[in-house]
Amino acid sequence: MILRTEGLTKIFELRPGKRVTAVDDLTFSVDEGEIFGFVGPNGAGKTTTIKMLMGLIFPTRGRAFIFDAPIPSEASKARIGYLPENPSYHEFLTGLGALRFFATLAGVPRRDRKKRCEELLGMVGLDGAADRQLRKYSKGMQQRLGIAQALVGDPAFVVLDEPMSGLDPIGRKEMRDIILELKRRGKTVFFSTHILPDVEALCDRVGVILGGELRDVGRIGDLLSPRVRSVELTAVAPGVAREALARGRLLTAEGDRLTVAFDDEGAADAAVRALVMASGRVVGLTRHRETLEDFFVRRLDETRVPDRGDGAQQKAG
Ligand SMILES: Nc1ncnc2c1ncn2[C@@H]1O[C@H](COP(=O)(O)OP(=O)(O)OP(=O)(O)O)[C@@H](O)[C@H]1O
Ligand SMILES: [Mg+2]
């Protein structure tokens, strides 16, 4: 096990008598070699959790262990690469200069530094901007430098707070490839996000945090409902064959070509049979299962209590 938390809690005191439970009794673990997605909406408590794990702020209650050492541990930190939520670096350094500085801090031997930094700048697509000052970097370029910075010490455990933030579609794809490559090299990756397609594409397991509470942990396939939610049938249905589709909801109609949705598989199958009997033709049949986005919305709806306002603030305030 790379990471384990036990009842990790953070309460911020905004002013006397007004408190926010940002993270509430979090217990979960991350196994060696897995990609773990930490998913939750804005203000859910992701960054607060990560900051506690990195030793930047202290838990109000609870404990956490990284590489079996209680946090914060200098020995563990030497094996962790961390991308903060809003990285900002010394703006008069060049990209290469900044990365060499971080390589020095991370204890990369002097003889390896230049090669390691150049390789990483290539990996994050900054090789053309290595000699440009960071104040002239765009937001996405700064984010890319942050990723290179997180990896410069060849860490065994990589913690990324919103790695896709500020990246364009190509940058996001590259970031996904980098994360998968890290896994191939045997690293463990823990990253926070609210970009659900990235989670579905990358993660072995996810933890869902809502209002400071960990609501679900597990493999995506186990969390999503296996039930078919709807079936979409596109058919060429001339004249009488149209009746066969009458039990569904008409989505589109272009001449003889109709797309109809059914709420269960049985109804869709019966429609297909009737359609064929009436000399119609099936063009496409798509079964819709729950996506991570559906799951997320469902869990949010289940959590939402009328007239309570912000969940985090209410609990302690
Ligand atoms: N230093 C602080 N003082 C007071 N409250 C804080 C502090 N930091 C965070 N909070 C509160 O804790 C809660 C969780 O914030 P956090 O930054 O952890 O959320 P997040 O999940 O990272 O959200 P986002 O997706 O927007 O980055 C919020 O209600 C926030 O206002
Ligand atoms: Mg955050």
Image: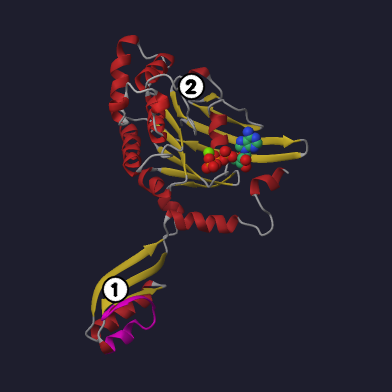
Element type at mark 2: helix
Of labels 1 and 2, earlier in sequence is 2
Residue 150 appears in the picture as rendered: no
- Disc 1 Cβ-to-ligand 1 distance below 8 Å: no
**Crowding at mark 1 (Cα within 10 Å: few <14, some 14-19, many 20+):** many
Judge left or right: residue 155 versus residue 44: left
Q: Name the residue at 43% across, 43% down.
A: 205
Whether residue 39 can be seen here: yes
Residue 139 appears at what percent x and percent y?
42, 34
Q: Report which residue position mark 1 lands on.
A: 234
- Disc 2 marks which amino acid? Ser
- When the figure is inspected, residue 86 is found, relative to residue 234, above or below; the finding is above
Q: What residue sits 65% from the left and 57% below the top?
A: 305
Q: Amino acid at mark 1?
A: Thr
Q: Which residue is denoted by mark 2 in the rendering? A: 76
Q: Quadrant of ligand 1?
A: top right
Q: Nearer the viewer, mark 1 or mark 2?
A: 1
Residue 282 in the image: state x and y as whole percent: 24, 75
Is 291 within the magenta? Answer: no
Frontmost residue, 222 versus 167: 167
- Give the answer, above or below, for where 106 lies relative to 223: above
Residue in the picture at 28% in, 89% down: 240
| Spot occupied by residue 45 in the image (x, y as percentages of width and height) | 57, 40
The residue that appears at 33% across and 15% down in the rendered structure is 113
Of 38 and 84, the residue lying toward us: 84
Q: What quarter of the picture does the C terminus occupy? A: top right
In the image, the segment drawn in magenta is 240-257
Q: Tags 1 and 2 in contact by the CB under 8 Å rule? A: no
Q: CA distance from mark 1 to mark 2?
A: 56 Å
